Amino acid sequence: MSALLQVSGLTAHYGDFQALFGVDLALEPGEVLAIIGANGAGKTTLMRAITGIARVSGGTITLAGAPISGRPAPDILRAGIAMVPEGRRLFPSLTVEENLKIGAHARRGSGFWDLERIFALFPVLKERRAHPGTALSGGQQQMVAIGRALMSNPSVLLCDELSLGLAPVVIREIYAAFPMIRDSGTALLVVEQDIGQALKMADQVHCMMEGRIRLSGRPQDLSREAIHDAYFGVSHG
């Protein structure tokens, strides 16, 4: 039986530069998969390829058994893959509530996530619903970005660098929302620079380097030394 999201032999190029080399991964419903790696490892390119933003030059991506590689980004969003982009990218002219509602434009029929469920997930957003989205703190803006993506009721939520530039207490608050997201049936694919955070919240971890997955496994099965070596490309000969 195929996974909810299956990536097989994925390659991607930017012009003559090859960014991904034969990447494989599988994500099951309600599972959290963390992708770690240094800057330039190919993590964001992988996310952009899955969502249809970056062009795939080889390999396949399937969602619930249906091929999606090569389809336009809006089609992939409608099929059930939503992304929380690095840097949040809220609309400055819109309120918190308006930013959230924009996420529902790709929704087909009804699903678990609606405005009230987002406000239950992040109560501070209900208090700030009439504020401009960009008038909030960085952590609260990140909550809006997550809520906006969830409003499309995705089966897979991609999160790119959620903790970047945020204080540890805020990061913990954001990751505390993951159990409710998982319980809704949504699977999470998370790119995370914070290795400790990734190991705490993920069911499986992939470490990327130079466009390849160098190490994969469950957090409890991966030694700190193996992660360090895969992250920094250390070889013991």
Image (spheres, rainbow, N blue to C red):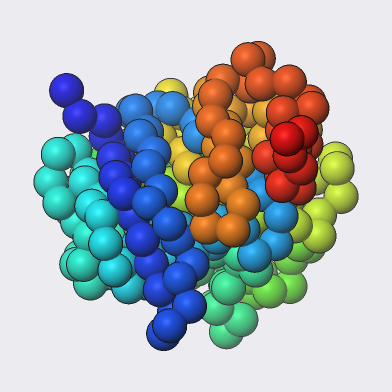
Q: Quadrant of residue 169?
A: top right
13 relative position to 217: left or right:
left
Q: Which residue is farthest left?
A: 66
Which quadrant, please, contains the N terminus? Answer: top left
Q: Observer-nearest residue: 77 or 8?
A: 8
Question: The C terminus appears in which quarter of the rendering?
Answer: top right
Residue 188 placed where, x, y %?
Answer: 46, 39
What residue lies at 63% left-to-right and 28% top-to-bottom? 201
Q: How many marks?
A: 0
Q: Position of residue 229 (x, y in %)?
A: 75, 37
Task: Tell me if residue 69 can be seen.
Answer: yes
**Is residue 116 something that shows in the picture?**
no
Which residue corresponds to the image point at 14% horizontal and 39% vertical from the top-left? 65
Residue visible at 45% across and 71% down? 18
Q: Is residue 229 or residue 126 the one in the foreground?
A: 229
Query: Measured along the vertical axis of the image, is residue 153 above or below residue 215?
Result: below
Taking 113 as reference, is 14 above or below it?
Answer: below
Q: Kindly identify the residue that appears in the image at 21 percent across and 46 percent down.
A: 62
Coordinates of residue 46 in the picture (x, y in percent): 45, 58
